[in-house]
Image (cartoon, grey):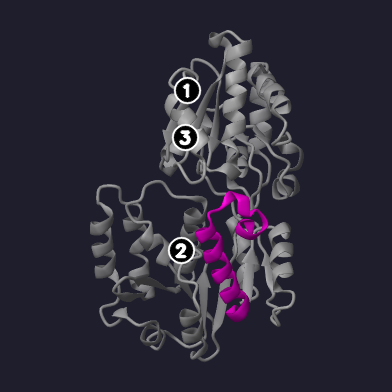
Amino acid sequence: MVTPVLDLSRSFTRLGRGAPTGIDRVERAYLEEVIRRGGWALIRTPRGFLMFEPDRLKRLPEYLDREDLDGADLASTIRAIASSRASSLSIRKIMWRMPNGLAYINVGHTNLNPQTMRAMMEMPDHRKIVMIHDTIPLDNPEYQTEAARAKFIERLTTVINFANHIIVPSDQVAENVERRMVGTGHRVPVIVAPLGIDIGALPLNTERAEKPYFVVIGTIEPRKNHKLLLDIWERMHRKMDESRIPELRIIGARGWRNDEVFNRLDNSTMMGRTVFELGPLDDKAMKAQLAGATGLLFPSFAEGFGLPPFEATSLGVPTITSPLRSIEVYLGDNAIYADPGDMYQWFQAIRELASQDPAEQTRRRAELRAYRLPTWEKHFDRVFEVI
């Protein structure tokens, strides 16, 4: 019997750092599934590795959700939960305290190095399964720092050299990863498993805004194309009476290589009038903002999967998005597509959605909520059937 062992090192590094990212939410979904399957977990800390047996692992989720403790306090609490006989040890010593036939699972891109992988190879009947969310640092280097790109190359090289299976969220990422394996002498099986969409029930007391508003969700970095949306809202201010301009609500932390956009967010006269930077929000607050929106805007240039349009659809919120392959495959006609380089297309689509008849809005929202989206159940069925 294969015992799943989830690497939660990323979650540990994210303690006290605010709202979860898309990768954080994927790692959390895996944590719940590994708990359900009676699995184990490990965490790499600056002091060494921590090990969590099944009974101790069940206690972790409640602490990962705590907002009343800072990162240091949470880290101390989690260290106390870890097995006292396997705490702050080397990876080799941790491995020899785990059961034979383990399946090491890493979906957080943290702790991917040859030392960890080689330690796994000493275990009888072991498996190493790694998720690669996208290959954007290689395919679109203009959106990354050189340091981030170099780190990604190091991690992907490790995965190709040592992993038994690679999980990816879409066919496009699978093709990109397989292309990177050409000439390496390694051919790792790639499993395509779309991410599950489980945003839950509609929030209670969803905001009833005085006028239409749109949301954009994601780190404010060049790939997400916030510049296009600011250009559109500036055009609206030139062409329309301000009372008729819908609001733009920007949800997400400030990222990198985007000084022009940051400067506009700090100094534009639109800010606080029709454009609002809300920063990173926790899942509950993000969900409430999204559920009350006229639409989600997703003008991204590149994605491995692209969670926000799927989350919007699950809440019955229309999406205007770039024609990204994964969204076209899994959402089809349930999204409105516009070229991320064509401001006029986006301007027209936003105006049309903002002025849509209320009865049509209600019908469309019900239709979207009824659409069958990818589920975590199917994702895990696909992953665990091969390990």
Residue 6 position in % (x across, y down): 46, 71
What are the residue bounds of the magenta stretch?
135-164
Count the numbered circles shown. Answer: 3
Residue drawn at point x = 74 percent, y = 63 percent: 175
Q: Nearer the viewer, mark 3 or mark 2?
A: 3
Residue 260 position in % (x across, y down): 52, 34
Kind of residue indicated by mark 2:
Leu
In this rendering, the answer to whether 149 lies above or below 204 is below
Residue 31 position in % (x across, y down): 46, 63
Q: Secondary structure at mark 3?
A: helix
Whichever of callouts 1 and 2 sits on the residue coming sooner in the sequence is: 2
Kind of residue indicated by mark 1:
Ser
Residue 158: say if magenta: yes
The residue carrying mark 1 is 268
Is there any visible trace of residue 231 in the rendered image? Answer: yes
Relative to residue 238, is residue 67 drawn left or right? Answer: left
Whichever of callouts 3 and 2 sits on the residue coming sooner in the sequence is: 2
Residue 197 position in % (x across, y down): 58, 49
Q: Nearer the viewer, mark 1 or mark 2?
A: 1
Kind of residue indicated by mark 3:
Phe
The residue carrying mark 2 is 31
Crowding at mark 1 (Cα within 10 Å: few <14, some 14-19, many 20+)? some
The residue carrying mark 3 is 262
Whichever of callouts 1 and 3 sits on the residue coming sooner in the sequence is: 3
